[in-house]
Amino acid sequence: MLDDNVPQPWRARTTLVLSLTLVAVGLGNLQRLPYLIGEFGGGAFFLAYAASVLLLSVPILIAEVSLGSLGRGSPGLAMHWAASAANVDSRWRYLALLQGLLGLIMAAMATLMAVWCFRWAALIFGGDLAAASAIDVSEVYVDYLEDGPHQFLAALALVGFTGLLSALGIRLGMGFLAWAVLPVVAITLLGVLDFIFLYTDLRAVSEFLFARDLSAWRLDALWVALSSAGLTLGAGLGLGMALGAQAPPGLPWARSILAVAVLDAAFMVTTAIIVCAALFEVNVAPAEGLATVFIGLAYAFANLPLGETYGALFYFSMGCVAASATVVLIEPLVLMIGREWGAGRLGGAILAHTLIVLIVSICLFFDATLLTSLATVTVDWLIPTSLLATSLFVGWLMPRPVLRGELYREPLWLFWLWWRVLRWLVPPVCVAWLMRGFL
């Protein structure tokens, strides 16, 4: 029986799927994947990435959603309840705190990404980069990075808006993002893709992204695919527990998460085509990092016919996705502060978003390398640690009948496949990921 104090605002799984898709697209490696796909053999790398998503991120996210559905509370309370059901030490609940802090770090990164995307949308649409050279665009980029006050004010305004949506809760806040923002972004990206088809030569894109060049495949590609897949769906960040606790019981959790993976792949391919086609059209090679997104791509749109309009639409849509992802990423921490610390929904949203502002202000005014250092530690150590701990707890400590009770809507064969992958495959992969960080 459900706790009457826990709101149950969702009537179907669509809101869950769309909310998690916002995170997947927001963390969808816009800075990396277009370059990595081509660098490591095109189709071969994409298949490795898709396999990594299915065998690493998807099982963990299903486990998190199952824990949230079982516990029906904040991630910390859900872990405490699950530990009681498994008759193990209740200190496992601190895993939820780690995941909430990871979500906070990723939310701060997403906030800055959104600020930069909105700024570039305004610059391109306003004609400030019209016919600009790559050097001119890079100067604008460097000048803006050094303009801490303007970035901070923009981030403060954005955090105020996302904090309001977070305070409104799942039905009004996140529901608006899932049902309004994501469809608009999808339609916008399809419009930009149509523009790309009309005004660029896609032959080079086809050879770069969809080639079957096995000679470019290296062992490093496997680790790159794993780390990219480990980030993209937001697994290990407590999102599944936070959303699963507030979703109706008895949803087909596994198939819902698989739907998120499919939508993420569709968005990823669409943005990769747009980015690579625009860059190739102005003879710029795709590369990894923010410079490609905010210098190379901006230069490309500024020098394409109608590029100001469609470039602004592209950056605006990416900014909307990044801002929306912030609301979902911070949800586990909002729930923990609100329910475990007694601050309520509004207090949890205010405190959590204040922490985002604190991290952003430190990065902008005191230590510009902090965000890079946090990203490195997060990707190399904290996320694989979180994935490993989750897989061990659910795969080895949780009673199988309890898990089956949460996943009773799934076919028995799918449940057994998920449980065995979580138990036998995910832990050694995470250990190898951590060992690679040591080396």
Image: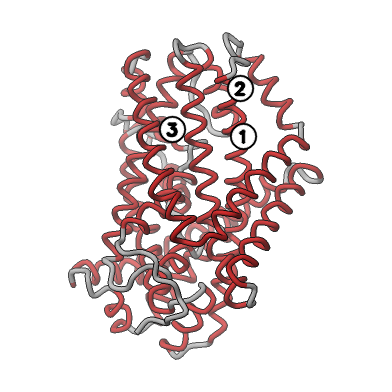
Q: Nearer the viewer, mark 1 or mark 2?
A: 2
Measured in 3D between alpha carbons, the distance from the residue under mark 3 to the one under mark 1, in whole angstroms, is 19 Å
Whole-percent x and y of residue 289?
57, 34
Q: Are marks 3 and 2 in contact (CB under 8 Å)?
A: no
Left or right: 122, with 317 as reference point: right
Scheme by which the image is coloured: secondary structure
Name the residue: 67% across, 43% down.
155
Whole-percent x and y of residue 423?
35, 72
Report helix, strand or loop for mark 3: helix
Q: Nearer the viewer, mark 3 or mark 2?
A: 2
Report helix, strand or loop for mark 2: helix
Name the residue: 38% across, 74% down.
69
Left or right: 176, with 399 as reference point: right
Report helix, strand or loop for mark 1: helix
User: Can you tell which mark lies on residue 123?
Assistant: 2
Name the residue: 61% across, 47% down.
109
Residue corresponding to mark 1: 116
Measured in 3D between alpha carbons, the distance from the residue under mark 1 to the one under mark 2, in whole angstroms, is 10 Å
